Image (cartoon, rainbow, N blue to C red):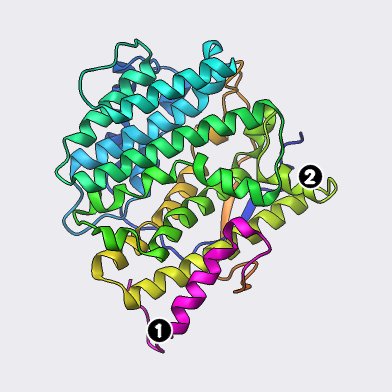
């Protein structure tokens, strides 16, 4: 696989979500690094301790007038670090490379999510630290939202297991199947339910299960995942893995990588345009809490991109298999006011096409007003 050309140094992204003040990032990051070190996930001078994952936790959360509970932000930041560390551990740890061993490991993680009681008997740092995260979730007052985070974490673990198997068997799927699997692997399933917890409000079961809310819950992280694929392609290429750019090249007869970048960005822009439609429709028609939820989760996209352009995870990625560092071309984002593809109709991708059908039905029953939509 060929890394992105050095000529691609400014990537056009349509992101009508402004930068916003956010919780203090440096202290959040330092606390999460200390947490990882305490659980034996890494050492203070390791590469993992220098990827500033606490910053992505901070930039993805818009600062409210009342601030955010430190307890919730610290938990969110620790979850971010755990997810990135576990993603690398599946390749870095020799004991997890045999398929049966990884399956057994994921089953143990699954069981820990079921039982936030006594610490697990395994000395594995990922089991011990996940137990700590699960225990802290169980201590939260909003048990319904905490359960959504727990179930989202379970989905992430299952998705990561499937993703690792697919990469190791070199099974390049169709674009349609790739998008379906990427939604499970990208960590959004546990990130999104944090927003009501951090924001200090509750979604009722009816609000949480609103069809458009459920679509946004998958849609927003998928946009971030495609952004990540473009930014991190050199990282995957260095260890022989693939992402959406390789999937597109495979489907299009091996066309140039620059064309795959263009098509990937057009797809994520089309998804972004869909998110804006859903967000604005819910702002007009939904309850205040659901409208806020749909608005605030968009910062996952903006915050992730701001972090991804700066972090060592992608600027100087570490090969999880060898420990070798790779210095990458520095990318910048060219924030665009208009999408590269603004087609309002469903794409020929059954795994996601039904999202457009839902918003079209909702808009037909309650047409948009002519006035501006409040954030």
Around disc 2, counting alpha carbons within 10 Å, would you say few (fewer than 14), some (14 to 19), or many (20 or more)?
some
Q: Quadrant of residue 92?
A: top right
Residue drawn at the location 70% of the way across and 42% of the way down: 173
Res. 128 mark: none
Where residue 336 sits: x, y (%)? 57, 65
Residue drawn at the location 36% of the way across and 63% of the way down: 294
Magenta span includes 363:
yes
- Residue hosting label 2: 250
Q: Does residue 325 appear to the left or right of 18 in the view shown? A: right
Q: Quadrant of the N terminus?
A: top right
Give whichever of 66, 173 is nearer the camera. 173
Around disc 1, counting alpha carbons within 10 Å, would you say few (fewer than 14), some (14 to 19), or many (20 or more)?
few
Q: Magenta segment, which residues? A: 346-375
Tell which residue pokes out farthest to the bottom in this image: 370
- Residue hosting label 1: 366
Where residue 40 sits: x, y (%)? 35, 14
Q: Quadrant of residue 170?
A: top right
If you read the primary sequence from the N terminus, does the residue marked by circle 1 or circle 2 appear first? 2
Residue 298's place in the image compared with 139, above or below, is: below
Q: Quadrant of residue 263?
A: bottom right
Give whichever of 351, 317 is nearer the camera. 351
Q: Secondary structure at mark 2?
A: helix
Q: Does residue 334 appear to the left or right of 115 in the view shown? A: right
Where residue 41 sits: x, y (%)? 39, 18
């Amino acid at each position: 696989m060929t890394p992105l050309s050095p000529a691609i140094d400014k990537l056009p992204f349509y992101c009508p979500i402004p930068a916003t003040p956010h919780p203090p990032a440096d202290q959040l990051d330092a606390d999460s690094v200390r947490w990882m070190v305490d659980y034996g996930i890494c050492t203070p001078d390791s590469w993992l301790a220098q990827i500033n994952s606490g910053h992505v936790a901070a930039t993805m959360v818009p600062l409210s007038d009342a601030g955010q509970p430190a307890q919730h932000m610290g938990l969110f930041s620790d979850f971010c670090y755990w997810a990135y560390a576990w993603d690398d551990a599946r390749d870095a740890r020799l004991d997890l490379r045999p398929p049966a061993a990884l399956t057994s490991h994921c089953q143990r993680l699954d069981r820990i999510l079921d039982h936030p009681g006594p610490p697990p008997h395994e000395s594995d740092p990922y089991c011990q630290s996940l137990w700590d995260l699960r225990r802290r979730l169980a201590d939260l007052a909003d048990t319904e939202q905490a359960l959504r985070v727990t179930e989202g974490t379970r989905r992430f673990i299952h998705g990561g297991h499937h993703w690792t198997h697919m990469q190791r068997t070199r099974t390049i799927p169709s674009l349609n199947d790739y998008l379906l699997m990427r939604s499970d692997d990208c960590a959004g399933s546990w990130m999104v339910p944090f927003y009501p917890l951090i924001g200090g409000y509750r979604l009722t079961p009816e609000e949480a299960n609103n069809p458009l809310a459920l679509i946004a819950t998958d849609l927003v992280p998928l946009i971030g995942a495609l952004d990540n694929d473009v930014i991190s392609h050199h990282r995957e290429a260095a260890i022989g893995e693939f992402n959406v750019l390789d999937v597109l090249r495979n489907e299009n007869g091996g066309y140039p990588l620059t064309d795959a970048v263009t098509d990937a960005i057009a797809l994520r822009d089309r998804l972004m345009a869909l998110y804006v439609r859903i967000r604005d429709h819910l702002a007009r028609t939904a309850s205040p809490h659901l409208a806020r939820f749909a608005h605030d989760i968009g910062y996952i996209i903006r915050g992730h991109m701001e972090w991804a352009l700066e972090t060592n995870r992608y600027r100087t990625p570490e090969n999880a298999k060898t420990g070798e560092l790779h210095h990458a071309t520095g990318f910048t984002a060219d924030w665009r006011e208009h999408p590269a593809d603004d087609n309002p109709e469903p794409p020929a991708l059954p795994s996601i096409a039904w999202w457009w059908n839902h918003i079209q039905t909702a808009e037909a029953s309650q047409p948009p007003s002519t006035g501006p939509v409040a954030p």
